């Protein structure tokens, strides 16, 4: 019997993990299945660009996994049953149950409405390709002078607001921040961000909290009424509740609690990576939801799964978060380094150079994810006779 590995989700974390597991494990011993709702690989880091009308590459997952023996199952995950080592999926043929020996949970995150009335019904977001295309259609239908309100000044909010303002100069763009604009950045980076907003004619509303959203209105806690033609909600992320419903140990926000090797602390046959994982970094702080965290948690899970199945030592991948790169349209950006306590360091980089750096990071992430057979070893590792006894680790 082959060891059955199921990977749920084929975003940056899931696709990278599946491809590299296929590289490193022998298909004579293992069977890898990837479950994903969409047939394409989605470049989530560029969805704000897609929303503004830019054409963004979306490789077919069937092409990405070609030559790897990975089985691609286009379906939506409906339940996870870790007690019986099974997942239920739904596709055009109905519901089906898939059994596994090892599960890699990489379902990522979506927009968090924080219980604000009207967000789900009326606001747009950019956390999925369909959502970004829906916003794109709305922006295409707006006339010059129309108002766009972006709620949230985290990285996604800043990138979305600046991208819309640069790509659609005829629109009036406003950005709502709960505190100071770019409050988690250094003083110099905040000044650079404010200059970019001024250059792009973005109106900034600081210390403002939106408490209600309607089709053409957004109402703040202090009673201020905005009248946008489109409200874009970028005020945080939420994870899929399937893990919690299945009985896995999760945090209050639904992330799966994992050990240093990304293994669920409650169900050892389950590994969580990317936004789905509550992982403690080398600085003893939780890793943030980000593409960088997807890479490091994915690498650690790969090493752990391969090590445990083949009897080899498990290397400790670096779990660090050292900087943020923020695009401010296509010709400007901010690179902000952070210390071990996730606080912004005084120095930062800004301008066209950072825009090129960010483009390089995104291009590299796409290449690494969509070329899982690169460097394919001549001999893949076979499963150990007793993999459960292989619990050695090394730094």
Image (cartoon, helix red, strand yellow):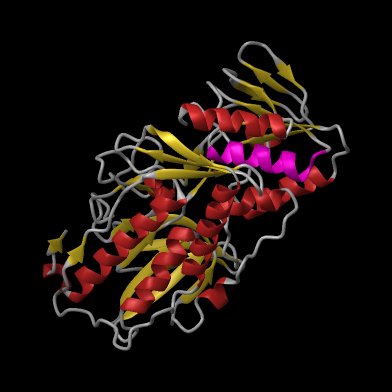
* Residue for point 56% across, 62% down: 37
In the rendered structure, the answer to whether residue 86 lies left or right of residue 353 reads left
Of residues 123 and 145, the one drawn nearer to the viewer in this rendering: 145
* Residue for point 60% across, 51% down: 128
| Residue 323, quarter of the rendered image | top left
Of residues 235 and 98, the one drawn nearer to the viewer in this rendering: 235
Q: Position of residue 219 (x, y in %)?
A: 68, 19
Q: Which residues are magenta?
A: 155-169
Asked if one can make out residue 144 in the rendered structure from this viewpoint, the answer is yes
In the image, is residue 168 part of the stretch drawn in magenta?
yes
Of residues 192 and 277, the one drawn nearer to the viewer in this rendering: 192
Q: Please tell me whether residue 394 is drawn above or below residue 172 in the rendered image.
A: below
| Residue 374, quarter of the rendered image | bottom left
Q: Position of residue 30 (x, y in %)?
A: 32, 79
Of residues 7 and 338, the one drawn nearer to the viewer in this rendering: 338
* Residue for point 36% across, 63% down: 86
Asked if one can make out residue 85 in the rendered structure from this viewpoint, the answer is no
State which quarter of the image contains the C terminus: bottom left
Q: Position of residue 171 (x, y in %)?
A: 81, 36
Q: Residue furthest right?
A: 143
In the image, is residue 385 part of the stretch drawn in magenta?
no
Q: Please tell me whether residue 317 is drawn above or below residue 242 in the rendered image.
A: below
Q: How many marks?
A: 0
State which quarter of the image contains the N terminus: bottom left
């Amino acid at each position: 019997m082959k060891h059955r590995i199921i990977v749920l989700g084929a975003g940056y974390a899931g696709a990278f993990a599946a491809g590299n597991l296929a590289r490193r494990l022998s298909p004579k011993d293992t069977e890898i299945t990837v479950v994903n709702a969409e047939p394409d690989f989605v470049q989530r880091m560029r969805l704000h660009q897609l929303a503004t009308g830019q054409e963004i590459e979306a490789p077919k997952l069937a092409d990405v996994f070609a030559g790897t023996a990975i089985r691609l199952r286009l379906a939506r995950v409906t339940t996870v049953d870790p007690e019986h080592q099974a997942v239920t999926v739904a596709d055009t043929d109905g519901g089906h149950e898939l059994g596994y020996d090892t599960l890699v949970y990489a379902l990522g995150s979506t927009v968090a409405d924080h219980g604000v009335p009207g967000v789900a019904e009326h606001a747009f977001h950019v956390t999925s390709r369909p959502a970004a295309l829906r916003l794109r259609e709305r922006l295409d239908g707006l006339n010059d002078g129309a108002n766009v309100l972006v709620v949230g000044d985290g990285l996604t909010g800043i990138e979305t607001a600046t991208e819309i303002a640069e790509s659609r100069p005829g629109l009036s763009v406003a950005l709502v921040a709960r505190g100071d604009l770019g409050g988690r950045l250094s003083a110099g980076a905040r000044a650079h961000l404010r200059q970019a907003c001024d250059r792009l004619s973005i109106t900034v509303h600081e210390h403002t909290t939106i408490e209600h959203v309607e089709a053409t209105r957004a109402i703040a806690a202090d009673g201020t009424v905005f009248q946008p033609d489109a409200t874009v909600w970028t005020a945080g992320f939420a994870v899929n509740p399937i893990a919690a419903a299945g009985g896995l140990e999760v945090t209050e926000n639904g992330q799966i609690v994992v050990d240093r090797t990304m293994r669920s602390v409650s169900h050892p046959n389950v590994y969580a990576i990317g936004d789905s994982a509550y992982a403690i970094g080398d600085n003893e702080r939780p890793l943030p939801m980000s593409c960088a965290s997807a890479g490091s948690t994915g690498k650690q899970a790969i090493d752990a799964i391969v090590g445990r199945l083949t009897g080899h030592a498990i290397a400790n991948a670096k779990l660090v978060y050292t900087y943020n790169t923020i695009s401010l349209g296509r010709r400007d950006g901010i690179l902000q380094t952070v210390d071990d306590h996730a606080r912004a360091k005084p120095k930062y980089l800004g301008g066209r150079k950072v825009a090129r750096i960010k483009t390089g990071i995104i291009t590299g992430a796409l290449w690494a994810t969509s070329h899982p057979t690169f460097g394919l070893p001549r001999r893949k590792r076979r499963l150990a006779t007793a993999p459960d006894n292989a619990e050695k680790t090394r730094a």
